[in-house]
Image (spheres, rainbow, N blue to C red):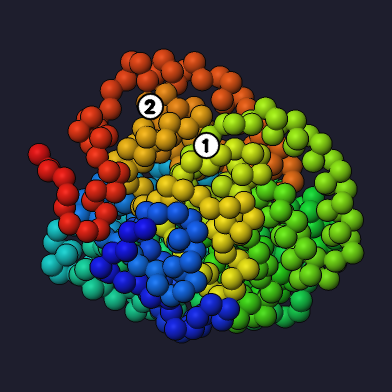
């Protein structure tokens, strides 16, 4: 295990205690400070879990970094999904490049839900060189007025940038004064990319803005259950309706009025704790909405545990046991057939933290030998402080340790080196930019963007079918590997993959 010189200790609240949610603060603390999260580690998953539980987790610095994600993009991808709100990016116009991909996702999501076609409402203040000298608050005010005149949103979010943060624009002051002038919530979301190496801090920034400025105290309690997800398919109606509850999806295609009273919900479910750790804890701590504290429902054991936690929170324990029994009878015989087909096969995973842990559980459930994982960051605990939510610890306890476990913020050069060494039968990726590396090496690579595709008992079968199909149809990647070139030379592929992670420089750089 690599232990670096930059120690990140577990926050003093310790495991099992909820972090303090401070809605008076204009911005949320970054994950490195709030949770003790890291982006640099190599070893085994068991060693990482042990280090986190013992308070000895160390973040290891890289002397070479190829790329990173930006927390501003993650904040934007949540806020842009609120149908009747607008987003003003207080930034140079180049930062608005994120809006292209999210507008595509927005339109696709509308079509899937049979919603009227509409273009997302995203704007930029276009900070220029002179604005970095004289300030850009006046430009921000003018942009807010113009946005309101053009589209009449029910709320406007201001996402900050490295430029606006460095020059010290008083975004909060502008938001407050323009709220009074325009008569709608103008909400500052502080998500400057340079503040955190962990891009998922952007999720926390977006949800802090929502719960601080939009959510109101409950008038009454309802039978609705908050679902914190990205933009995947709606599957929770089938789970909740037989229990007498209604699924309420937070942010993806919700309205401002929907968000105002998520405090009235009976519970909060997270598809991915990496996404929803902050808002789940905030709703429980501030408004008493219980959060499901369990690993996500991936794999049979994980789904059993998740279902029982759902039954406990919603007071439906008896009905849940009936559902577990019937689903086992339906799924397990089919699962055995897939396990037989996948016997002896190996896999490698690259994904964000919680979803990556969930995919490891699912692959282990199918009988694949997981040869390693490149996970984009690691949270030693979530905001609820409950060890029961630790999906990686669940994997190690349930299925055994995982070798070649690498925490990296999308460092493709490390991924290619490791893939070249372990040469798995399949690589599972969550993010499209990583799939090309497996294909170039001739490794069948499966990318599934819908996070609900693998959720629950049916999710195991869904993934099993796609994995078998991908492994059996590898002609394309085999041909691609023969006719493509790599930007990485044999010099690098012969090095230790973690040569630039901590310690002294032990390779010559040309």
Residue 82 position in % (x across, y down): 55, 57
The disc placed on residue 441 is: 2
The disc placed on residue 347 is: 1
Q: Quadrant of the C terminus?
A: top left
Secondary structure beneath disc 1?
A: strand
Asked which quadrant contains residue 174, the reply is: bottom left
Tell me the residue at 69%/74% (across/down).
290
Q: From where the camera sits, is residue 231 visible?
A: no
Asked which quadrant contains residue 225, the reply is: bottom right
Q: Dot 2, how many residues are within 10 Å of its Cα: few (below 14), some (14-19), or many (20+)?
A: many
Secondary structure beneath disc 2?
A: loop
Q: Is residue 162 left or right of residue 449?
A: left
Residue 90 position in % (x across, y down): 32, 62
Q: Is residue 211 left or right of residue 452?
A: left
Tell me the residue at 59%/71% (across/down).
387
The disc placed on residue 324 is: none
């Amino acid at each position: 295990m690599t232990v670096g010189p930059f120690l990140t200790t577990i926050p003093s609240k310790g495991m099992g205690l909820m972090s303090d949610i401070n809605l008076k603060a204009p911005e949320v603390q970054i994950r490195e400070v709030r949770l003790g999260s890291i982006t640099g580690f190599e070893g085994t998953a068991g060693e990482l879990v042990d280090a986190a539980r013992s308070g000895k987790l160390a973040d290891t610095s890289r002397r070479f970094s190829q790329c990173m994600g930006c927390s501003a993009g993650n904040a934007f991808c949540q806020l842009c999904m609120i149908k009747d709100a607008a987003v003003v990016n207080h930034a140079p116009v180049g930062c608005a490049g994120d809006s292209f991909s999210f507008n595509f996702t927005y339109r696709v999501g509308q079509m899937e839900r049979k919603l009227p076609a509409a273009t997302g409402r995203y704007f930029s203040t276009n900070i220029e060189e002179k604005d970095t000298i004289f300030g850009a608050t006046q430009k921000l005010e003018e942009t807010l007025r113009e946005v309101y005149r053009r589209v009449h949103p029910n709320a406007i979010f201001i996402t900050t940038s490295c430029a606006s943060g460095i020059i010290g624009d008083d975004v909060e002051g502008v938001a407050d004064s323009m709220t009074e002038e325009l008569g709608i919530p103008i909400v500052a979301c502080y998500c400057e990319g340079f503040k955190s190496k962990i891009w998922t801090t952007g999720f926390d920034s977006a949800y802090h803005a929502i719960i601080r400025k939009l959510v109101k105290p409950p008038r009454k309690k309802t039978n609705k259950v908050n679902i914190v997800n990205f933009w995947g398919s709606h599957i929770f109606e089938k789970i909740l309706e037989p229990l007498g509850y209604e699924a309420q999806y937070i942010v993806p295609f919700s309205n401002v009025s929907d968000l105002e009273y998520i405090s009235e919900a009976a519970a909060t479910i997270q598809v991915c704790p990496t996404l929803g750790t902050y808002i789940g804890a905030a709703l429980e701590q501030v408004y008493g909405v219980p959060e499901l504290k369990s690993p996500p429902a991936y794999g049979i054991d994980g789904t059993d545990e998740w279902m029982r936690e759902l039954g406990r929170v919603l007071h439906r324990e008896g009905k849940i046991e009936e559902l577990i029994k019937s689903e086992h009878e339906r799924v397990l015989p089919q699962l055995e057939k897939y396990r037989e087909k996948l016997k002896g096969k190996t896999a490698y995973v690259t994904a964000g933290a919680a979803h990556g842990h969930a995919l490891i559980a699912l692959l282990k459930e199918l009988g694949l030998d997981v040869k390693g994982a490149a996970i984009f960051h690691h949270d030693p605990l979530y905001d609820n402080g409950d060890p029961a939510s630790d999906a990686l610890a669940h994997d190690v306890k349930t299925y055994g340790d995982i070798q070649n476990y690498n925490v990296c913020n999308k460092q493709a050069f490390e991924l290619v080196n490791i893939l070249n060494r372990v040469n798995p039968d399949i690589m599972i990726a969550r993010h499209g930019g990583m799939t090309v590396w497996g294909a170039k090496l001739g490794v069948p690579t499966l990318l599934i963007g819908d996070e609900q595709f693998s959720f629950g008992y049916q999710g195991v079968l869904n993934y099993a079918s796609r994995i078998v199909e991908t492994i059996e149809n590898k002609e394309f990647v085999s041909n691609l590997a023969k006719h493509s070139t790599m930007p990485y030379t044999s010099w690098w592929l012969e090095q230790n993959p973690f040569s630039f992670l901590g310690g002294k420089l032990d390779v010559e750089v040309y």
